[in-house]
Image: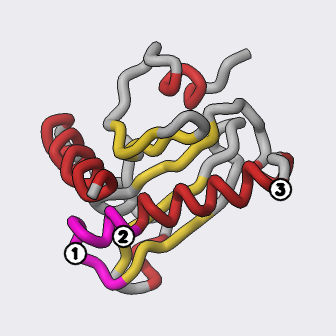
Amino acid sequence: MSSIFSKIVAGEIPSCKVAEDSRFYAFLDIHPVAEGHTLVIPKQETDYIFDLDDALLSDMLLFAKRVARAQQKVIPCKRIGLAVIGLEVPHAHIHLIPITNESDMDFKKPKKNLPTEELQAIAASIAAAFEE
């Protein structure tokens, strides 16, 4: 059965795309813990990130690095935090979260509820920085 992320990659479910290449897709989390919270996924459906082959995992991290650099250009923050939890959706993914302090990475705090138009504007600005 396809994961929700596979359906996003296939275009069956809309997303606020930040970046894409032939193997990876990055999009904004619709329930972000911080503005600009982005998910990076392989297009290949694999449940657990450490089940990816070494080359794909390495390339995914390099793709995520490019996304993080783009986030830093447009989202005010000190760093981009990286988290791999892997329990919420059965599809390997990395959370990239703009942070100013450690508490910004707290997944237990209430999620932000941003209007679709604001998410789209954030995604467009990160996407433009990614392409630079």
48 to the left or right of 25: right
Q: Residue at x 21, y 45 (%)?
A: 124
Mark 3 or mark 1: which comes first in sequence?
3
In magenta, the rendered stretch is 69-78
Query: If the image is split into quadrants, where does the C terminus sit?
Result: bottom left
Q: Position of residue 85 (x, y in %)?
A: 67, 57
Q: Position of residue 16 (x, y in %)?
A: 32, 36
- How many numbered circles are shown? 3
Alpha carbon distance from label 3 to label 1: 33 Å
Q: Is residue 108 visible?
A: no
Q: Find residue 25 and name its label.
A: none
Q: Residue at x 63, y 40 (%)?
A: 42
Cβ atoms at labels 1 and 2 below 8 Å apart:
yes
122 to 117, vertically: above or below: below
Q: Nearer the viewer, residue 101 or 47?
A: 47
Q: Amino acid at mark 3?
A: Asp
Q: Residue at x 45, y 39 (%)?
A: 20
Image quadrant assignment for residue 78: bottom left
Find disc 3 in the rendering and name its residue: 54
Find disc 2 in the rendering and name its residue: 98
95 to 29, vertically: above or below: below
